[in-house]
Image (cartoon, rainbow, N blue to C red):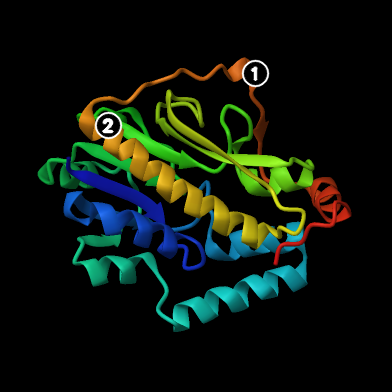
Amino acid sequence: MRIAFLTTDDPLYLPDFFDRVLERRSDDTVLVAIVPPLYARQSRAQALRRYRRTFGTADTLRLARRVAAAKLRRRSIAAVCERRGIRHGRRRDVNAPEFLDELRSLETDLVVSVSCPQLFRRPLLELPSRGCLNVHGALLPNYRGILPSFWMLANGERTAGVTVYFVDERIDAGDVCARRAFEISPDDTLDTFLRRSKRVGAELLLEALDQIEAQTVRRLPMNLEEGTYYSWPDGEAVARFRAAGRTIW
C-alpha cells in the first residue's frame, strides 16, 4: 500500500505523531507533503493577530517562544522524514493539478490528512484507489470543525477521543473507520491534552491502516443531525475555558 501524507508545518505536536506512525509505515510512505499552517488564504501575520485577539498577548508570546525553541532543536516533520529517508517537501496547494500529477506519478493508493488545513476537492478525493483518510481529534460527529480540543475543555467534557474517517467534500463528515475515547484529566492544559490526543491518534491511525491493507475495514456513516460543529473561538468561549480552570500551557 503506497501512502501519501498531507500535513502542516507544526513543530510542537506533529513531529512525535509522525515519528510513531513512520516507525511502522516508513516503507509504505511515498510522500509527506507539508503545507502552510494557514486557513482561508491567511497570511502568517493575520493568523498571529487572530491568535492574539483570541487568547491574549501573554499566551501568544508563549506560543512564539515554544515554536522558536522547537525549531532551534530541529524539531520538525521534515527532520523526522530525513532520519527515515522518506520523500517530503513543502507544497502550497494540495488541489493543484501539478500536485495531483505528483501523486499519480507515485502511484498513490491512499492519502492521509493529518491537520492539513486545506479542503480536499473531488479530483484529489477520487485520485487514490483506497480513498482519503483524515485524523480528527474528537469523537465525530461531535466537535466537527476547528480546535476540538479547546472546545471540549471549554465545555467541561470529561471524555475526549479521536476519529479516523474517509474524507468526502463536506467538513468532517465522511464514513468513520476507527474511533477511540480517552479520559480528560482535571489537570489537563490545552497543551497536555493535545499531546495525548496526538499519541492516541497515531495509534488509532496505525490500526486503521492495518485494516485497510487487510481489506477488513468497516465504514460507518456519520449521522450529522446528532453532531455538533465549532468554528474559531470567540471571547465568551475563552472566558468559559478559563473559568473552568483551564490554561493553554
User: Disc 2 and disc 1: Cα gap in Å?
Assistant: 27 Å
Q: Earlier in the sequence, mark 2 or mark 1?
A: 2
Residue at (67, 74) in percent of width and height: 62
In screen coordinates, is 126 left or right of 53? left
Circle 1 Cα neighbour tier, 10 Å, few/some/many (<14 / 14–19 / ≥20): few
In the image as oriented, which residue stretches furthest toward the right?
A: 243
In this picture, is 177 found above or below 201? above
The kind of residue on which mark 2 rests is Ile
Measured as percent of width and height from the top left, residue 224 is found at: 58, 19
Q: Considering the image in quadrants, where does the C terminus appear? A: bottom right
Q: Residue at x 40, y 30 (%)?
A: 167
Element under disc 1: helix
- The residue at which mark 2 appears reads as 212
Given the image, on which type of amino acid does mark 1 rest? Glu
Whether residue 115 is situated above or below residue 69 in the rendered picture: above
Residue 113 visible in the current orientation: yes
User: Can you tell which of label 2 and label 1 is closer to the viewer?
Assistant: 2
Where the N terminus falls, by quadrant? Answer: top left
In the structure shown, which secondary structural element does the residue marked by tag 2 occupy? helix
Badge 2 density bin: few <14, some 14–19, many ≥20, Cα 10 Å: some
Residue drawn at x 12%, y 41% as measured from the top left: 107
Q: Residue 183, position in %: x, y? A: 66, 45
